[in-house]
Image (cartoon, helix red, strand yellow):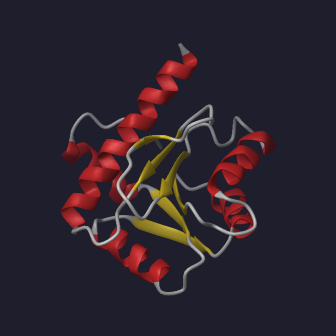
Amino acid sequence: MTANARSLTDFEAWLGAATLLVGDHDHFRRPATCNALRGAGARLIGEAVDGLAAIESIRRYAPDLVLLRRDLPIFDPIQVFQIVRSLNPDSHRNMQFVVLTEVESPGEISGVSGSLAQLCIDGIPAEEIRARLFGVTRRIASMRQRNIG
């Protein structure tokens, strides 16, 4: 399943059907992030406390959207992205990766080829989380098009 929705309404339908994985080592912030995503209509299938657990969960559940905190221990989000892509590129082709940051700095992660973007959702209302996730998944789709073409 991919988030190539043309409108926010299409995206909200996708988000309700998509599976998400959240990776965050902070025992206070992770539940808050998960609750915020559920409030935005997301269906979470897993939580990971470090990069190794994230890789294991990705291999086990193959989520549609992976959201990892920038300061994830053992393997950071970029390393997780690269390891997952190297293990079996075809099986994870439609999976989207987002690095969750504490400050707003949207866009691509420099030095990484592929579909990886960053996003801040801390302290944001559910409607805004949906809108930001919609925007970031559209940016990822655009990055993929540039990398293919």
Q: How many marks?
A: 0
Residue 49 quadrant: bottom right
Q: Nearer the viewer, residue 104 or 4?
A: 104
Q: Is residue 123 left or right of residue 54?
A: left
The residue sitting at 47% across, 69% down in the picture is 44
The residue sitting at 38% across, 49% down in the picture is 105
123 versus 56 height, above or below: below
27 versus 113 height, above or below: below
47 versus 61 height, above or below: below
The residue sitting at 38% across, 45% down in the picture is 106
Q: Position of residue 16 (x, y in %)?
A: 34, 59
Residue 139 quadrant: top left
Q: Position of residue 78 (x, y in %)?
A: 65, 49
Q: Nearer the viewer, residue 85 or 120?
A: 120
- Looking at the image, which residue sits at the far right? 87
- Looking at the image, which residue sits at the far bottom? 28
The residue sitting at 19% across, 61% down in the picture is 127
Q: Position of residue 56 (x, y in %)?
A: 74, 64
Q: Position of residue 34 (x, y in %)?
A: 42, 74
Q: Is residue 126 left or right of residue 113?
A: left
